[in-house]
Image (spheres, rainbow, N blue to C red):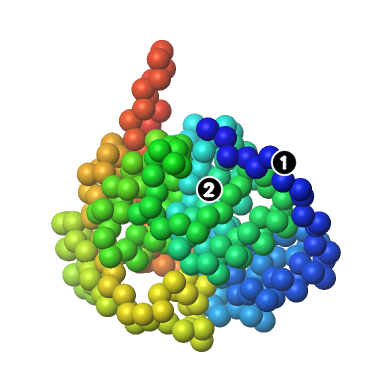
């Protein structure tokens, strides 16, 4: 199934001044993405939090090598879905890494506007952004994906089980999940023996919020659930992923929350059978 656009006139490429003005108009961006003319989506004067500078590089250093390993070493010829893509940084990275087709989806129109500006600037024809709720994903309409990126969304869901079932229905092989974890002082290690979710009512935000690059979609109070590590693993197994691995932070320079256990990345792989070949499995750390 091909999704490349054909017979559509190419838009005139923005000049450096035009692109810089567009970036500044839409700033702040949650991902620091390299653009033509030496520009970046990271605008220090507009930034609300340092995470806008570190988010992409942290996750690429921490998880991308393991994601590629799970995908057989390359994204060449692969279809990739980026759920809650925000301004599109990881979608762009996957497209640049050789994926055949990358679809980034988000429910917040401002983030999709940012993502489409980036797409136009970097001129990647294997990349598409759509405003779409993950619950509206349909295998008959959107197809199957070899790799699904599920970064920074699990702990925001009101219905995590139903949502993961919907994701599993379009995930053909690998699902990469990056999530905040439930942390209860002192007894958290004991609680981690059982799959548990911490329910929180979080306030709505306005344009002055420090976390506006991730919370713009939440103008009203919202109920969400933060899992512990055991809950993530159990849920992924329940949704059909036979091999689930929580990645250990092995490199320096990551955001502190990965080292203290407040944030974690999981690689989940479905069984696939290929004639005459062994089933590709994610190699566990010794």
Q: Is mark 1 on a helix, strand or loop?
A: loop
Residue at (63% x, 59% y) in the render: 116
| Residue nearest the viewer, comparing 246 with 78 | 78
Within 10 Å of disc 2 (Cα), the crowding (few <14, some 14-19, many 20+) is: many
The x and y percentages for residue 273 are 36, 22
Whether residue 270 is visible to the viewer of this picture, yes or no, is yes
Above or below for 144 versus 35:
above
Residue at (31% x, 54% y) in the render: 163
Nearest to the eye among marks 1 and 2: give it: 1
The x and y percentages for residue 109 are 52, 67
Q: Residue 213 carries which label?
A: none
Marks counted in the figure total 2
Whether residue 285 is visible to the viewer of this picture, yes or no, is no
| Residue nearest the viewer, comparing 195 with 133 | 133
The alpha-carbon separation of the residues under discs 1 and 2 comes to 20 Å
The x and y percentages for residue 159 are 26, 60
Q: Quarter of the image holding residue 282?
A: top left
Q: Mark 1 points at which residue?
A: 7
> From the viewer's perspective, is 245 left or right of 84?
left
Residue at (63% x, 40% y) in the render: 4
Q: Residue 103 carries which label?
A: 2
The x and y percentages for residue 213 are 52, 73
């Amino acid at each position: 199934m091909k999704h490349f656009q054909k017979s559509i006139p190419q838009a005139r490429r923005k000049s450096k001044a035009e692109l810089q003005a567009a970036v500044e108009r839409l700033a702040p961006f949650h991902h620091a993405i390299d653009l033509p003319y030496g520009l970046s989506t990271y605008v220090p004067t507009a930034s609300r939090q340092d995470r806008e500078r570190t988010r992409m590089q942290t996750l690429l250093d921490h998880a991308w090598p393991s994601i590629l390993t799970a995908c057989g070493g390359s994204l060449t010829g692969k279809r990739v879905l980026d759920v809650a893509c925000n301004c599109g940084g990881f979608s762009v990275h996957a497209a640049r890494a050789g994926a055949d087709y990358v679809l980034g989806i988000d429910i917040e129109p401002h983030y999709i506007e940012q993502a489409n500006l980036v797409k136009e600037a970097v001129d990647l024809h294997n990349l598409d952004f759509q405003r779409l709720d993950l619950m509206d994903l349909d295998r008959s309409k959107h197809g199957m994906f070899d790799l699904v990126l599920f970064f920074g969304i699990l702990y925001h869901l009101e219905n995590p089980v139903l949502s993961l079932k919907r994701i599993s229905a379009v995930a053909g092989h690998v699902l990469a999940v990056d999530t905040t974890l439930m942390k209860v002082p002192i007894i958290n290690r004991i609680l981690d023996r059982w799959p548990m979710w911490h329910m929180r009512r979080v306030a709505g935000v306005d344009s002055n919020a420090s976390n506006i690059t991730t919370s713009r979609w939440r103008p009203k109070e919202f109920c969400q659930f933060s899992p512990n590590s055991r809950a993530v693993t159990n849920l992924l197994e329940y949704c059909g992923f036979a091999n689930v691995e929580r990645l250990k932070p092995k490199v320096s320079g990551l955001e502190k929350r990965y080292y203290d256990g407040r944030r974690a990345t999981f690689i989940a792989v479905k069984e696939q059978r290929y004639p005459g070949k062994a089933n590709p499995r994610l190699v566990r750390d010794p």
